[in-house]
Image: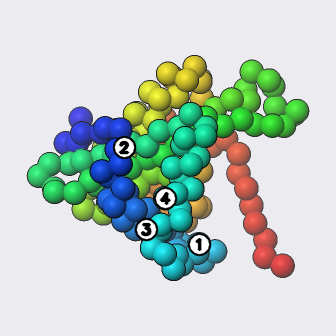
Amino acid sequence: MPDCQVRPYTEADRDDLRAMMLALQIAERVMEPNRAQWSDAGASYIEEALAAVAAKKGAIFIAESHPLPDPVGFVTCWQAYEDDSIVAATERDYLYVADLYVADVARGRGIAGALLDEAEGHGRTLGLDQVRIGLLSANQSARRAYQKAGFEDFEVTLRKRL
């Protein structure tokens, strides 16, 4: 069991959430050059995330790990719908995990799994029976954490630059 507490986001977490979102963006920019360099240090992205959570029956959960003074991770998730007639109607609704972050200082302690557990619990309260999450192909540590949490490959998107 990880040495952490996971709780729902509150407005008092805004500055910490913004800092973690920025850290996630910076880490992803190292792996994928198409990630934007935010001139506003993530202020507009946090507003986008909060709006999506509000509009789509979503949630944000914050992880704390004592004795560390600041939150060490977060997950954002919301209800999503696959609007594609090739997918069976019973398989179209799902919980989408948009962002998951654990600070370097807290990695390897099961915090990602604890955050995913909370997100999955939120999905169950919405009556959903599946959760989906994406990742950058270069992010092998995230892939390992997601597989450890029971995720399996579902779809693969390939890219070719022209």
Residue at x 61% of width, y 37% of height: 56
Q: Looking at the image, tell me whether mark 3 or mark 2 is earlier in sequence order.
A: 2
User: In the figure, residue 22 lies in which quadrant?
Assistant: bottom left
Q: Are marks 3 and 2 in contact (CB under 8 Å)?
A: no
Would residue 132 be visible to someone looking at this image? no
Q: Amino acid at mark 4?
A: Ile
Q: Amino acid at mark 2?
A: Tyr
Q: Is residue 29 above or below residue 50?
A: below
Q: Amino acid at mark 1?
A: Arg
User: In the figure, residue 91 lies in which quadrant?
Assistant: top right
The residue tagged 2 is 9
Q: Is residue 11 left or right of residue 127?
A: left
Q: Is residue 84 above or below residue 144?
A: above
**What is the CA distance from the residue labelled 2 to the residue labelled 4?**
12 Å
Residue at x 52% of width, y 28% of height: 123
* Residue at the extreme front of the image, as rendered: 11
Q: Looking at the image, tell me whether mark 2 or mark 4 is earlier in sequence order.
A: 2
**What is the CA distance from the residue labelled 1 to the residue labelled 4?**
16 Å
Q: Are marks 2 and 1 in contact (CB under 8 Å)?
A: no
- Residue 64 is labelled as none
**What is the CA distance from the residue labelled 3 to the residue labelled 2?**
17 Å
The residue tagged 4 is 46
Foreground disc of the pair 2, 1: 2
Q: Is residue 89 left or right of residue 138?
A: right
Quadrant showing the C terminus: bottom right
Q: Looking at the image, tell me whether mark 1 or mark 4 is earlier in sequence order.
A: 1
The residue tagged 1 is 35
Q: Is residue 24 left or right of residue 160?
A: left
- Residue 22 is labelled as 3
- Could you say where residue 111 lies in the image, as x and y percent from the top left? 31, 45
Q: Amino acid at mark 3?
A: Leu
The local crowd at label 2, few if under 14, some if 14 to 19, many if 20 or more residues have their Cα within 10 Å, is: some
